[in-house]
Image (spheres, rainbow, N blue to C red):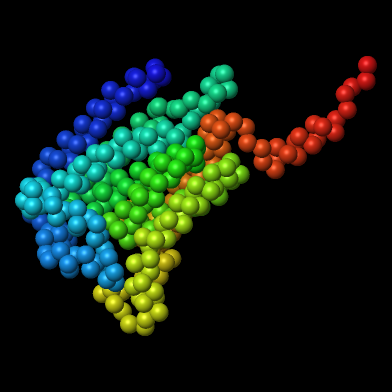
């Protein structure tokens, strides 16, 4: 066993316990707010009505409400009972983030072999525990802490599939993304994100294109019920969701500012230049690291650059004596 992993695991266990304690304390101090009341209502109403959310337009979180149903029958529908699954999901996300980060952050040792950097994954897990958004949603009776956990789990299975292949990883990825999609509608965005990531890792990722392709093909089946009502909303001229239309550029601008500078209004992107630079640098370094990970696991993979180098080497004549 790696000595550094042995040293870091007690600290990781301590971090997980801190995350759990911080989220569970004061869990029922505040009364339920509207969305939490809706969650209890959707979970405990007539089962047929809740199942109809699978095909009813713009109804979100059907699997979350169905999962709450037996839980409420077992422990009751109190504030603590409603919010406790979010506590568990937020706590489990800490070691999941650590595992995902261990796959992404590798350092090259003096012997030119790759080894896992334990500091960066632990730092990422620490930031997650202290993140105000994650703490808030980890104490809320909604599905947001759950989908964070499912996103990390799906990404971990995806990395396992890309690194070593195997039908178990891709089947687990298919099941996890399918569950995430019906826990929150926007989890369908996991598909294009991982697809883009797959092409960024090309040509190293091409060895496992078949398994990933079959997983993507399988994901079309759970998406079909959504397509039924989404197409109707797309072609209609009437407002059906109850929300005013917000253009995509405005959505991106609001998300960019609210997750960087907070909710203070600003019309200039100049103060965010350092963050944008760090984001682009992270993408480039991530591509390089993923290439190193794949070559370390499956051996040297020849791409077009390697072929050109090989031709140059073959054309060189041995020096004359």
Percent coordinates x, y for residue 236 in the rendering: 37, 81
Q: Is residue 304 left or right of residue 207?
A: right
In the rendering, at what x and y percent does residue 132 appear?
A: 25, 45
Could one spot residue 20 in this view of the protein?
yes
Q: Is residue 266 visible?
A: no
- Specify the farthest residue to the bottom: 237
Give me the residue at 27% from left, 65% from top.
54
Quarter in which the N terminus is drawn: top left
On the rendered structure, is 35 left or right of 233? left
Which residue does the image show at 24% across and 67% down from the upper left?
53
Q: Position of residue 144 (x, y in %)?
A: 26, 52
Q: Is residue 255 above or below residue 274?
A: below
Residue 257 or residue 94, whichever sits in front = 94
Quarter occupied by the C terminus: top right
Pick whichever, 46 or 121, lies toward us. Answer: 46
Compared with 11, 198 (above or below) is: below
Q: Is residue 262 left or right of residue 158?
A: left
Q: Examine the rendered structure and indicate whether residue 172 appears above or below residue 192.
A: above
Q: Residue at x 19, y 36 (%)?
A: 20
Vertical placement of 158 versus 314: above or below? below
Which percent across, then down, holds residue 160? 44, 38
Q: Farthest residue toward the front?
A: 167
Residue plotted at (8% across, 48% down) = 74
Q: Quadrant of residue 159?
A: top left
Where on the picture, by quarter, is residue 120?
top left
């Amino acid at each position: 066993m790696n000595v550094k992993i042995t040293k870091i695991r007690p600290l990781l266990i301590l971090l997980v316990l801190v995350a759990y304690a911080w989220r569970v304390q004061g869990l029922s101090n505040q009364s339920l707010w509207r969305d939490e009341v809706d969650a209890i209502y959707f979970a405990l109403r007539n089962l047929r009505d809740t199942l109809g959310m699978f095909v009813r337009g713009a109804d979100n979180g059907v699997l979350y409400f169905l999962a709450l149903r037996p839980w409420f029958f077992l422990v009751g529908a109190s504030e603590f009972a409603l919010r406790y699954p979010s506590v568990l999901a937020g706590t489990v996300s800490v070691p999941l983030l650590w595992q995902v980060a261990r796959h992404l952050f590798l350092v090259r040792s003096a012997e030119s072999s790759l080894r896992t950097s334990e500091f960066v994954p632990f730092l990422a897990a620490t930031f997650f525990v202290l993140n105000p958004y994650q703490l808030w949603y980890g104490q809320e009776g909604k599905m947001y802490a759950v989908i964070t956990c499912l996103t990390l789990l799906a990404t971990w299975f995806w990395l396992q599939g890309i690194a070593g292949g195997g039908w178990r990883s891709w089947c687990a990825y298919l099941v996890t993304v399918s569950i995430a999609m019906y826990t929150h509608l926007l989890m369908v965005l996991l598909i294009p994100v991982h697809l883009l990531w797959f092409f960024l890792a090309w040509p190293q990722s091409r060895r496992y294109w078949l398994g990933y392709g079959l997983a993507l093909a399988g994901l079309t089946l759970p998406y079909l019920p959504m397509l039924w009502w989404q197409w109707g909303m797309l072609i209609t001229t009437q407002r059906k969701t109850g929300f005013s239309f917000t253009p995509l550029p405005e959505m991106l601008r609001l998300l960019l500012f609210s997750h960087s500078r907070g909710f203070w209004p600003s019309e200039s992107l100049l103060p965010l230049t350092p963050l944008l630079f760090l984001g682009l640098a992270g993408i480039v370094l991530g591509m390089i690291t993923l290439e190193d990970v794949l070559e370390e696991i499956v051996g040297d993979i020849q791409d077009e650059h390697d072929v050109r180098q090989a031709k140059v080497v073959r054309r060189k004549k041995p020096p004359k004596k």
